[in-house]
Image (cartoon, helix red, strand yellow):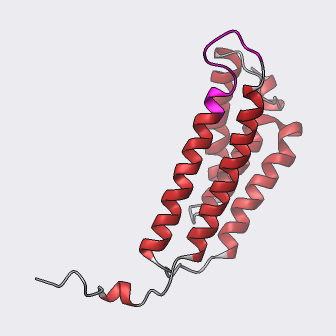
């Protein structure tokens, strides 16, 4: 039986608190304050019901505050962790997919633009040929478009493929 006061081998290499964890906790706390401030402003509006426009933003601000505290506690408990090195090429593929979708969306519509995002993200994760994922992603996004646009009557950007339907 081991002594609970003796640090484990993996913990002995860690020194101090996790600075990245504290940065994330700070960001969550800041976001909580912004959402809470906006909820407070919404609570100043006169409403005729028990639940006004500030109810859900207040709940979200409280949840973000709890996450900030939990993240800070975890950063203290776990200590500084060794993180894997970032790989720039996969990140560039995913970022290129997002930028491409933003650029293509007004001209080529939802299906093609989101198909490109699907293909670029798959490539970023090291999966097969881009053209195959583009075709599969475009087909899936067309089905999603038809469900949203035709079935639910929601407006999504239409391109040449969507106009056929």
Residue 85's place in the image compared with 49, above or below, is: below
Residue 35 visible in this rendered orientation of the protein: yes
Tell me the magenta residue range. Answer: 46-57
Q: Is residue 28 left or right of residue 159?
A: left
Position of residue 28 in the picture relative to residue 69 (left or right): right
Q: Is residue 145 left or right of residue 8?
A: right
Magenta-span inclusion, residue 113: no
Tally the numbered discs: 0
Q: Quadrant of residue 151?
A: top right
Q: Position of residue 143 (x, y in %)?
A: 62, 29
Quarter of the image with the C terminus is top right
Q: Position of residue 60 (x, y in %)?
A: 60, 39
- Name, please, the residue furthest toward the right: 107
User: Is residue 122 depicted above or below 140 in this figure?
Assistant: below
Residue 105 in the image: x percent, y percent? 83, 40
In the displayed orientation, state which residue is furthest to the left.
Answer: 1
As rendered, which of 34 and 99 lies closer to the eye? 34
- Classify the position of the N terminus by image quarter: bottom left
Residue at screen point 53% across, 65% down: 72
Residue at the (62%, 64%) spot, across then down: 24
Horizontal and vertical percent position of residue 95? 74, 60
Residue lying at 61% horizontally and 18% vertically, measured from the top left = 51
Residue closer to the observer: 39 or 107: 39
Residue 143: tell me if it is visible: no
Task: Report the magenta stretch's main SS.
Answer: loop
């Amino acid at each position: 039986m081991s002594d609970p006061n003796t640090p484990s081998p993996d913990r002995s290499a860690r020194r101090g608190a996790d600075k990245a964890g504290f940065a994330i906790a700070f960001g969550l706390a800041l976001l909580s304050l912004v959402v809470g401030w906006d909820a407070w402003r919404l609570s100043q509006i006169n409403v005729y019901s028990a639940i006004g426009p500030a109810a859900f933003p207040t709940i979200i601000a409280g949840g973000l505050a709890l996450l900030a505290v939990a993240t800070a506690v975890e950063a203290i408990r776990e200590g500084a962790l060794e993180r894997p090195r970032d790989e720039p090429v996969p990140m560039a593929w995913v970022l290129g997919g997002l930028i491409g979708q933003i650029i293509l969306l007004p001209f080529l519509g939802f299906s093609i633009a989101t198909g490109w995002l699907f293909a670029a993200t798959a490539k970023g994760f090291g999966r097969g040929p881009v053209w195959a994922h583009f075709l599969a992603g475009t087909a899936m996004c067309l089905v999603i478009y038809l469900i949203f646009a035709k079935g639910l009557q929601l407006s999504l950007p239409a391109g040449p493929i969507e106009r056929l339907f």
